[in-house]
Image: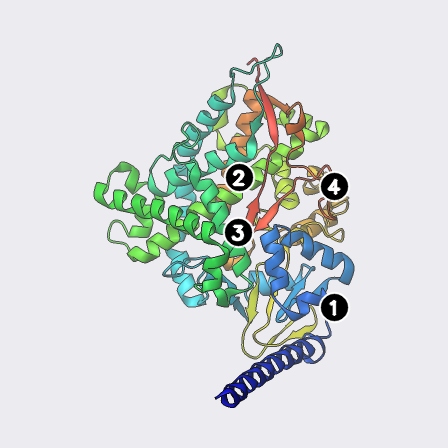
Amino acid sequence: MTSALGSFVYCLILAISLALGLSSLTVVGICAYRLWLHPLSKYPGPFWGKITNLHAAYHSWKGDLHLDMWRCHEKYGDHIRYGPDRLIFNTADEFVLDVYSSGKDVHKCKGYLTMMHRVPNTITQRNKTLHARQRRLLSHGFSDAALRSYEETIDRHVQRLCEKLGPDDCESDENWSCAKDMSKWTGYITFDIMLDIIYGRQSAMITKAENRYLLEAIEKSNIRVGVLMPLWHLKGSFIERYLFPSSIVARYEFLAFVKNLLKTKDDEGADASWRQSVYSILKGSEGKEGLGPNEIAAESTNLIVAGSDTTSTVLAAALFYLSRDPTAYAKVAAEVRSCFHRPADLHNRSLLHSCLYLRACIEESMRMAPPIASALFREVDSGGTIIDGHFIPAGIDIGTSIYSIHHNSQYFPEPFQFLPERWLPLKDGSNQKDVQGAHSAFMPFSIGSRGCIGKVLAVMELHSILANLLFFFDFRVAEGDVGAIGEGKKDAEWGRHREGEYQLYDHLTAMKYGPFLQFRKREL
């Protein structure tokens, strides 16, 4: 009996040893292949990035994916390997035109599957034909006529924001307000605007705290999605549930809010606000083609998050840089205050669009702090493709880090300086080449048929909100320690060491903190 048991234990140990040995050999073999025999082995890049997508997932979890990509370009050059089957390019022109504008020989990568709930929306749809149908239907909600109909909605919410930023209990002798965390207030107003435009409903984040939990829910959910994008095969697995329990709960909190919103709209039926909302277009009003219930839910989630979260980042960045740049602040304030002589003038869109320096400040804020800062990957179709003179095999993911290309000195001299003037052509045409070069590498909303469908609406919001704040208020960096929240630190890791740079935390979309500002009502 003892002999039999001993033989069994011996065989078990031998089997485990063989299994571990084979597993070790398999891992070593995979690593060796990816390092030296893989079609992408000739490209430089971070060591662990060549072996595993865990490298990208780690930096996404950490919130510095965009900075790590930028650091890699600084170290290895414009064409680097950032995953076993991933390349990132830091060039514009042919690459941007071929990959993002025309979508030549590429389609969205499998990572977008991690963002999908039940059915694809216009962001997660990988099939080009189905995407074209979805985008065609949705485009009616962002036509020129539709955008004009949203102007009153935007103005109404901007007025509410100005009322909340006005006099408060903390007023000093010089009438400055309490310190306001503008990462929060920009989120409140953009969420309120999008919910009103999409559904004709009021979330009232500006005036009430009831729904403000949704912004945190979106941020928590995005942490999970950002990590899973390069590890898409783990979606729905035990590992996902173990690593991201709070993110999953937050995701379902947000989805429950959207579900309840859709049910309420259906129960109410078609009223005036319904007919003027994007929801009526998704539903298919007046006998026109619409989307199915699951498609509407998926598209609604997309519109709320993409339309509010990203716009709030640019708005917060603009306030950060203007509050720290007296010259740019003085120029844009003078432009707005000379263009608009009374509050009613702020509703005049022609006057608003004539504020060229204001537009330049917005574009420079988008460049400095792109809301989606890392790479939007595309998978190469069968047959491969040639990009920037490089043959890329089928199945490889390729992309460009928006933060990296926006800080490439080839296109943007002094890339870490806030310089709105870089977007303004001089009358003598002496900087025309520089302005054209900047626009060639400028892609805060991506470009082409996969670009943000709501970018014109976002720019409308940014113009209106900033013009109103500059017209009604003076603002400054808050006094005390809170004034430094949102900026870099000299002793921070490389990439977060610039004190004058607004810090983003890249979790699919950008998380941010601050700036904390004080406001003072102007005498009109």
Task: Provide residue 307's location: percent of width, then percent of height.
Answer: 47, 45
Residue tagged 2 = 312
* Sequence-earlier tag: 4 or 2: 2
Q: Amino acid at mark 2?
A: Ser
Image quarter of the C terminus:
top right
Residue tagged 1 = 44
Asked whether the viewer can see residue 66, the reply is: yes
Q: Quadrant of residue 431?
A: top right
Task: Judge depth for marks 1 and 3 and give the one in front.
Answer: 3
Label 2 and label 1: CA atoms lie apart by: 36 Å
Please state which of residues 99 and 498 is positioned toward the viewer in this rendering: 498
Label 1 and label 4: CA atoms lie apart by: 27 Å
Dot 1 lies on which element?
loop
Label 4 and label 2: CA atoms lie apart by: 22 Å
**In this rendering, position of residue 480 left or right of residue 228:** right
Task: Provide residue 126's location: percent of width, then percent of height.
Answer: 46, 65
Q: Which mark is residue 367?
A: none
Label 3 and label 2: CA atoms lie apart by: 18 Å
Dot 4 lies on which element?
loop
**In this rendering, position of residue 380 left or right of residue 75:** left
Task: Provide residue 54's location: percent of width, then percent of height.
Answer: 61, 63
* Sequence-earlier tag: 2 or 1: 1
* Sequence-earlier tag: 4 or 3: 3
